[in-house]
Amino acid sequence: MFLFGMKVMSEALQRMSGDKLRAVMRKMTGNRVAGVGTGFFVTCLVQSSSATTVMIVSFVNAGLLTLIEATGMIMGANIGTTTTFWLVSFFGFKFSISSIALPIMGVALPLLFVRKAKLRNLGEFLMGFGLLFIGLMFLKDSVPDIRNNPEVLEFIKGFTGYGLGSVLIFFVFGTILTIIVQSSSVAGAITLTMAYKGWIDYPTACAVILGENVGTTITANLAALGGNVEAKRAARVHLLFNLIGVVWCIALFGPFSRGIDWLIPGDSMAADHIPLHMAGFHTLFNVCNTLLLLGFVPQLARVASRLVKDPGPTDAPSRDHVTYDSPLVPHTGELNLAEAERDVMRMATITRELVVGFADLFEKAPDDLDACVTRMKELEKLSDRQAVETTQYLLRCTSSGISEQAMARVTVMIRVVAEFEDMCDRGYRLVMLAERKHRKKRTLPPEVFQQVRDFSQVLLQFMDFASSRLGQGAADSDMETAYQLENTIDGLRMRLRKESVRRMQGNGEIIKSEMLYIDILNNIEVIGDHSLNVLQALRHSD
């Protein structure tokens, strides 16, 4: 119930703030402090460091964040996840849970049925918030009080009294617990409940918390299995950051844990005060670890790069997308649209390469004509594969329950992907026509080569204009420019076609060459039509 409430609350928050979060991510710079702040802010919003780190891995995989920028954000995410500890410690153990959760769920219920998307998302957030604390109430009630179950205490005592050895034992326990539940928030709630009920004392709870910090890194590493090299390195940075923190904290475990008693009022051994002391330990550990390692971000990145080496020529390439199919990986479809946007840009780049390749090939046959055509064919195959994968990925993102605005964006991107795939097909057809011209030794007047070059430049200008609007949409002024370019391309095709027809009328022997030339003009014009379709789709997405 606690985990389900956390999921509902996190997904509602993503729908409420997905656009803003993506905008923050796009504006990220190499400023490490800004990265820490962004990671903290995002984690506070989605209430899940696992979701944040998976999202960071996704952005690194998409090339929207560098490894150094991602490192700062990971540090901030570790601090941001401590807010859940404070929330649960303060509300879950200081107040009657049912007196908080049930009224909140009562307010949320009617909001779930309103038409306005923002109010529905708010209702889902409040419902998730209520379910979270109802789950915590069940958790508290299911854990027996140690005073009435002394045999459990005897079992726990068997692992205490070993000094540093006990700390390491409960550190391992915290790591395994977090790996099993795949949520540091849930593992933290279990630990808080165990301490509150007297199963474990304050130092033991602190050791478990350290283990939870390491266990939560498994989620990002699972997600990165399907990503590229940089995504894997970002996940390793997360693991390194927490492991280094655990090493120095265990070395200073006694004075560090006792220092919390000085900062947080109350007796850490009393049931009413131990949750807040644990939250203080969790926060201070992550803040100190961030301050300690913030100056060594490049070094952490270098160590991660050594752990995950660049793939050699014989190594299998990484998959294009971070894998979210695993039930252990949190679904963050609202935030993972950035990878799909990256793929759409990649398709635009492939299309441009095909048109440029055609223009070069048409003007002059290279010595390695077969190899050149083969490279173009590989690009066309890549575009087909990219179109299928991107469309499937977009559909997977929608399964996470994204907002209406994001759903509309997904619909637009699916249409844009289809347009770019058709453009790539036309681009490869142009390449094949240029190859046929050379193989069949079709001769054309000298002025035709300059005309094709100029026509191709106008088309590339139109394609670049459409590509530049992929991330921001097309305004009315953009559509005016688009229609002007479209009219220019249509006018050029009509004029050049008429000139070709006149040449055929004067000389019947060049009909095959001129028909090939007209076919080239028609395909260029069709690619222009697809560019206009892309801009029209982006216009409707505003």
Image: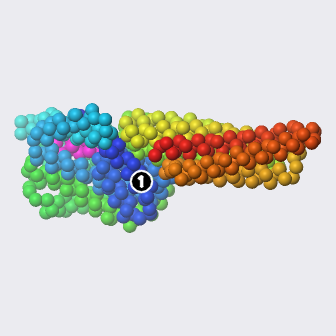
Helix, strand or loop status at disc 1: helix
Residue 449: image x %, image y %? 81, 51
Q: Quadrant of residue 221?
A: top left
Q: Which residues are magenta?
A: 184-194
Residue 188: image x %, image y %? 23, 45
Quadrant for the N terminus in the image:
top left
* Residue 468 appears left or right of 376: left
Q: Is residue 209 visible?
A: yes
Answer whether residue 389 is magenta in the image. Answer: no
Examine the rendered structure and indicate whether residue 342 appears above or below residue 298.
above
Most distant residue in the left direction: 148
Classified by dominant secondary structure, the portion drawn in magenta counts as: helix
Answer whether residue 188 is magenta in the image. Answer: yes
Who's the residue at 45% across and 50% down the image? 59
Q: Is residue 364 visible?
A: no
- The image shows a total of numbered marks equal to 1
* Residue 405 appears left or right of 412: left
Who's the residue at 45% across and 35% down the image? 396
Residue 289: image x %, image y %? 31, 60
Who's the residue at 15% across and 49% down the image? 90
Who's the residue at 75% across and 44% down the image? 494
Examine the rendered structure and indicate whether residue 98 appears above or below residue 293.
above
Mark 1 neighbour class, 10 Å CA radius: few under 14, some 14 to 19, many 20 or more: few
Residue 278: image x %, image y %? 18, 52
* Residue 66 appears left or right of 449: left
Q: Quadrant of residue 399?
A: top left
Which of 535 and 19 lies nearest the eye of the viewer? 535
Which of 457 and 356 lies nearest the eye of the viewer? 457
**Kind of residue indicated by mark 1:** Ala
Which of 60 and 511 lies nearest the eye of the viewer? 511
Q: Which residue is mark 1?
A: 23
